Amino acid sequence: MENLTLKTTEGIRLNCSMSGRHSFIFTLIPVVYGCNFAIGIVGNSMVVAVIYCYMKLQTVANVFVLNLAVSDLTFLITLPMWATFTATGYHWPFGSFLCKASAGLVIFNLYTSIFFLTALSMDRYLAIVHPVRSRRRRTVLYARITCVGIWAFAFLLSIPTLLSRDVFEIEDANNTVCAIWHDSDHINVLTISMMKSVLGFLVPFIIIITCYCLIGRALMGARVQIQRSVRSRDDEVLRMLAAAVLAFFLCWAPHQVFHFMDILAMLGVVKNCHTLDIVDTAMPFTICIAYFSSCVNPILYSFVGHNFRRNLLRLLRCRPRSPPTFTSKMSAISYRASEVLHFTASKKTSSSNVK
């Protein structure tokens, strides 16, 4: 991150010009970006291939997972440029267009990834807690319409970042950077930052937590009436949901904390160069952790599933697709739980009618 604050006729000068410029950052961060790129490209490509070739878009969850993987792939293609940018001491050699496009894709992926994760959480809530009432609306058609809406809304939210990013000449360091000049439009930059924190983290996280709490309560309430052979799978679903929420929080929370401190710096609340150096030094590492979510998503939402592992092995062995006979674990458990609850409710209703 560059704190661009003073403009001259020859270029831009920096307050705290050495802020966040440490040699270990220029060495370590590109390596991490490279690992994220390799793992993410392989993992998300396998998700797309398995769903397209074997699982097909026959369920709502598959539609969301496929779009999530495509979203991560569109972002991952920008990582080599950001790795080069960091390895060369924050020098951007790719021009203004790729600066705007790469920055726009980063924020675009932030919104699409979190929105698709939120949609997946809401779908799991409806499938497990309200399986009968939501059956008419939980269709592939509705899922595709939702995906189109998510792509469009995320694109609109990423336009301000795309327009405000540009290439600047840094006079003090004789360098060219891809950054946002804070003083050019202070209100616009602050609005973008607040949108990133509120719409890109806080609101989706609250929705996800609420959905999984309601799912956990519904499954806990149904466990007493579910057979013991089903309980182990019930617990497995709860563990997977907890892991998904924990991964979401761990990947994005550190970046959001330092992003909030960056907002305070833009507002002039934080002016000390030592504090800014801490923020600017930590920011690349928190970004790496946040970017790692693009690698974790395939593992959490696909690789832990028995059906995906089976189809992945068949893909690697180049075996043809067999007739679909699969049912996801969460759908099976939600069906059994709802079946027991529905049967119990029916018995109570019938007994009351007899009386």
Image (cartoon, helix red, strand yellow):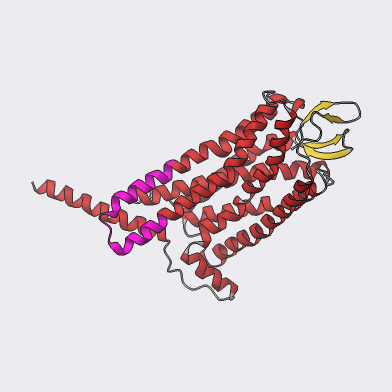
**Residue 130 showing in the rendered view:** no
In the rendered structure, does residue 99 fall within the stretch colored magenta?
no
Toward which corner of the image does residue 325 lie, by quadrant? bottom left
Residue 105 x, y percent position in the rendering: 69, 45
Nearest the eye: 113 or 39: 39
Residue 234 x, y percent position in the rendering: 36, 57
Image position of 159 with respect to 351: above or below: above
Judged by its main secondary structure, the magenta piece is: helix
Q: Residue at x 67, y 55 (%)?
A: 36
Toward which corner of the image does residue 15 lie, by quadrant? top right
**Residue 269 showing in the rendered view:** yes
Nearest the eye: 5 or 75: 5
The furthest residue to the right: 10
Looking at the image, residue 147 sits to the left or right of residue 135; the answer is: right
* Magenta segment: 210-237
In the rendered structure, does residue 234 fall within the stretch colored magenta?
yes
Looking at the image, residue 309 sits to the left or right of residue 39; the answer is: left
Image position of 298 with respect to 317: above or below: above
Nearest the eye: 16 or 252: 16
Residue 290 x, y percent position in the rendering: 62, 46
Q: Residue at x 9, y 49 (%)?
A: 354
Residue 64 x, y percent position in the rendering: 52, 52
Q: Residue at x 81, y 33 (%)?
A: 17
